[in-house]
Amino acid sequence: MTIRRGLGAAGIGTKIAPLVRHDAINGVYFKRDRYRIGHVKTERAPGERVKRSETTRGNLEPFMAVDHSIDKTVPRELVDGMSESALFGEMEQASYEALNEVQYDHELKVRNMLWADDQAGFNSIYGSDHVKTPGNKWDTADGEIYRDVQSLSDDILKTTGFRPNTAVIPKKVLDVLQGDPNNEIGERIKYTNGEIPDTTRLARYLRLDNVIVPESLEDDANPGQSNERYDWMWDGEHVGLFYVNPANTRNKVTLASTFYTDMPNEPFLGIFTRYDDDYKSYIVRCNAYFDAKEVDIKCGAVLYDVLTPPST
């Protein structure tokens, strides 16, 4: 049995599949098929009936918020004799770790839904028309980073009605964009103050709202095996371009949504603490009911293999 474990700071999943609250565990949402305007003229003559736009294109699809819970123990032996403030610090750290475990599971679900290990995998998610390989690699002097991003952004705009506002750039690609003086971005900044372009400046340069650099790690080896090795969850030398709409509605054009529910006694990502006599430990629990679903997959596209393959 393969054990998937995580390391690092998770939680970027909601930046790609934003939260949408629902009162019940089960529900439905519109799986959208592009946004159309201009098919009905809004101009109205005096006394003429107001025209009505067509209903949303798409199908109603079900979702089911599934419970994700984890307990973290703080043994009595660890905190015996501690002051109240010191005990609070131990509980706070356990709370952080429990929260991170749940967020990691959410990010992994979003990653598996929207990311792939090879080009065939990306093609099966987005369609081959939304998976492009740059003609010139980004780590060369001939790389056309801005042009490649804008060209694929135009494809998303023409397909969905919205220009992508978010990019997912894995660490391998970011290192080149920030540290290679010979690429397009390096050429531009060398005549300025020479500051390394952070994600805010990269977003502005690429005409985006957000550049996300995932830093979550995972290990597929069973615990304790000698080949245990952590690597990037969002791996590869690819760039994802996504249109993300954070509106709290089940009827919107966006790449994906995370449907969640709150309960009076179990708030979303709530933290609960108690003392367990059987374990003689404080128990810190984090839980969340959620389900992540794609809404309009054409709101996403991938620039595949943007870097030069390593020489053999």
Image: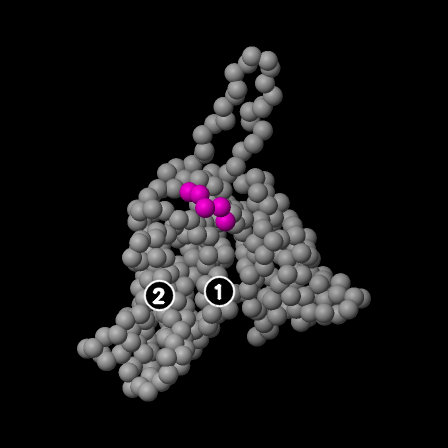
Q: Specify few, some or many for label 2: CA neighbours under 10 Å numbering under 14, 14-19, or 20 or more.
A: some
Q: Is residue 10 above or below residue 262?
A: below
* Quadrant that contains the N terminus: bottom left
Q: Is residue 143 above or below residue 128?
A: below
Magenta span has 281? Answer: no
Q: Answer whether labels 1 and 2 touch (C-beta < 8 Å).
A: no
Residue 109 can be seen in this image: yes
Q: Position of residue 16 (x, y in %)?
A: 49, 55
User: Left of 173 or right of it: where is 9?
Assistant: left
Pick whichever of labels 1 and 2 is earlier in the sequence. 1
Magenta span has 247? Answer: yes
Residue type, label 2: Ile
Q: Residue at x 29, y 76 (%)?
A: 282
Q: Residue at x 33, y 76 (%)?
A: 222
User: Left of 105 or right of it: where is 241?
Assistant: right
* Quadrant that contains the C terminus: bottom right
Residue sitting nearer the eye, 95 or 163: 95
Q: Pick out the residue farthest to the right.
A: 191
Q: Which residues are magenta?
A: 246-250
Q: Specify few, some or many for label 1: CA neighbours under 10 Å numbering under 14, 14-19, or 20 or more.
A: many
Q: Position of residue 253 (x, y in %)?
A: 49, 42
- Please identify the quarter of the rendering in which residue 193 is found: bottom right
Query: Marks 1 and 2, how far apart in space?
Result: 28 Å
Q: Label 1: which residue?
A: 234
Under circle 2, the secondary element is: strand
Residue sitting nearer the eye, 261 or 5: 261
Q: Label 2: which residue?
A: 271
Residue type, label 1: Trp
